[in-house]
Image (spheres, rainbow, N blue to C red):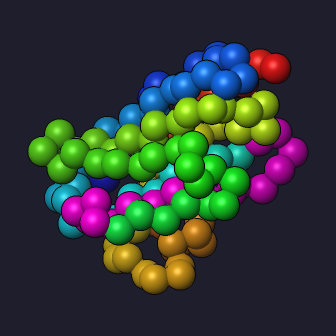
Amino acid sequence: VQLQAFGGGLVQAGGSLRLSCAASGCTFSRYPMGWFRQAPGKDREFVAAINWNGGMTVYTDSVKGRFTISRDNEKNECYLEMNSLKPEDAAVYYCASKNWWKEGGMALATEYRYWGQGTLVTVSS
C-alpha cells in the first residue's frame, strides 16, 4: 500500500489550500482515512478522519468549520480542504489509512497502518 500526499505550499493567513492523498496497492474504498499534521518541535496531531464511504467524518476542534475532509473512491483519493488558514496550521500534513472505523478512536496515530510521506503547509501571517 502506498499513500502519497501532495498539495502543500505557502499561503497567506486567511487563505485556502486543498491537500490530496493518492492511494495505490489496496482496495481504497474499504479503509477509513485520516489526516495528521506535525509542526516543528511538536507531536504529530490528528486533524480529520473519514470513513470508507464518506458518511462519517470527525475533526479536531481547532479545525472544525474551516477544514473539510472528503474522498473519491473512484479515483482512490482523499482530500483535505483547508480554509481560513492560520499561522498555527503550518505543519507537515500526513495522510494515513486505518483498517476500520472506531467511534471515538480515530485520533490515535498508532492505530493507522499506512502513512504517506507528508506535504508541507506554510502559512504566512
Is 9 on the left-hand or right-hand side of 74? right
Residue positioned most to the front:
65
> Is residue 8 in the magenta section?
no
Is 14 on the left-hand or right-hand side of 94? right
Image label count: 0
Residue 91: image quadrant is top right
Residue 66: image quadrant is top right
**Residue 2 makes an appearance in the image:** no
Residue 118: image quadrant is top right
Residue 19 to residue 122: above or below: below
Q: Position of residue 85 (x, y in %)?
A: 66, 32
Q: Position of residue 42 (x, y in %)?
A: 83, 50
Residue positioned most to the bottom:
103
Residue 105 to residue 114: above or below: below
Tell me which secondary structure the magenta stretch mostly adopts: loop
> Which span is picked out in magenta?
39-55
Residue 30 to residue 86: above or below: below
- Residue at x 63% of width, y 50% of height: 63
- Residue at x 61% of width, y 22% of height: 15
- Residue at x 29% of width, y 48% of height: 71
- Residue at x 12% of width, y 45% of height: 74
> Is residue 44 in the magenta section?
yes
Q: Position of residue 10 (x, y in %)?
A: 64, 16
